[in-house]
Image (cartoon, rainbow, N blue to C red):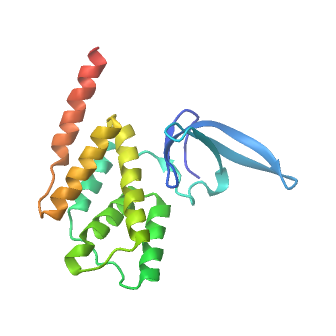
C-alpha cells in the first residue's frame, strides 16, 4: 500500500500528474470498496482508482529532482536493442509504460530514439509509445521542477537531440537554473 495523503500530487501512468482530492468509499456489488479520487488539471478530469490496486496500477508519489537527475543520466547510458518482432517489442514497451516508473519511461524514450542506430523501423505503435513516454516525463518534470509546459518540453527535446548527436546533457545545470528561478519567484 502506498503512503499518500489527500492534497498530494501523484503520478498515474495513464494520465500523468494528478492531485489526490479525497478518499472515497463506495458500495460495489454489495461490497464496500475504497478509492482514491484523483484530479488531473491538464485534462480537467477526475478518476477513481481502487486503493487496493493503486500501486499495481503504477500510482506513485512524484519523483524528486535527484531521482529525475539520475533518470536523466540513465537516458545517456548505453541503449538496449529492442526486440525485432513487433509483438514482443509492443509487450515490452507497454509494460514499461504501464509501470509508471521514471526509469522505465526514460528507457522507452532512449531505446526508441536510438532504434535508428541499428536500423529498426518504428511502427505507428512505437511512435505513439515514444510520444506517450515523452508526454509523461514532460508532465512530471513540470511539477517536480516547477517549469512551464514549454520549458519542460524544451528540456526533453534538447536531451533527445543531444542523445541523437552522441552528446550528453548536464542535468545539474538545469537543476541549478530551476533553483535560481524558484528563488526569484519566491521573492516576488
In x, y percent, where is residue 128? 42, 63
The image quarter containing residue 126 is bottom left
The image quarter containing residue 172 is top left
Give the residue displayed 47% in from the left and 81% down from the top. 87
Q: Nearer the viewer, residue 116 or 69?
A: 116
Give the residue displayed 32% in from the left and 50% down from the top. 67
In x, y percent, where is residue 75? 25, 61
In x, y percent, where is residue 112? 31, 69
Extreme-front residue of the structure? 124
Q: Is residue 63 left or right of residue 186?
A: right
In x, y percent, where is residue 173? 15, 41
Give the residue displayed 63% in from the left and 57% down from the top. 53
Q: Nearer the viewer, residue 61 or 116?
A: 116
Question: Quarter of the image containing the C terminus?
Answer: top left
Q: How many marks?
A: 0
The image quarter containing residue 39 is top right
Extreme-bottom residue of the structure? 85
Give the residue displayed 71% in from the left and 40% down from the top. 24
- Compared to 174, does 12 lie above or below? below
Extreme-right residue of the structure? 30
Q: Is residue 4 left or right of residue 75?
A: right
Q: Is residue 116 left or right of residue 89?
A: left
- Compared to 70, does 129 lie above or below? below
Amino acid at each position: 500500500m502506498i503512503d499518500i495523503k489527500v492534497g498530494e500530487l501523484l503520478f498515474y501512468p495513464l494520465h500523468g500528474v494528478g492531485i489526490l482530492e479525497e478518499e472515497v468509499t463506495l458500495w460495489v456489488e454489495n461490497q464496500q470498496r475504497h478509492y482514491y479520487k484523483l484530479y488531473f488539471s491538464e485534462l480537467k478530469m477526475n478518476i477513481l482508482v481502487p486503493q487496493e490496486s493503486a500501486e499495481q496500477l503504477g500510482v506513485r508519489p512524484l519523483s524528486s529532482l535527484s531521482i529525475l537527475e539520475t533518470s536523466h543520466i540513465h537516458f545517456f547510458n548505453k541503449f538496449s536493442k529492442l526486440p525485432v518482432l513487433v509483438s514482443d517489442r509492443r509487450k515490452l514497451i507497454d509494460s514499461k509504460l504501464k509501470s509508471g516508473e521514471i526509469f522505465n519511461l526514460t528507457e522507452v524514450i532512449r531505446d526508441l530514439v536510438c532504434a535508428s542506430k541499428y536500423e529498426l523501423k518504428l511502427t505507428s505503435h512505437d511512435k505513439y509509445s515514444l510520444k506517450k513516454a515523452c508526454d509523461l516525463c514532460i508532465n512530471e518534470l513540470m511539477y517536480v521542477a516547477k517549469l512551464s509546459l514549454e520549458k519542460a518540453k524544451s528540456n526533453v527535446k534538447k536531451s533527445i537531440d543531444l542523445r541523437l548527436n552522441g552528446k550528453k546533457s548536464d542535468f545539474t545545470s538545469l537543476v541549478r537554473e530551476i533553483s535560481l528561478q524558484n528563488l526569484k519567484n519566491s521573492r516576488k
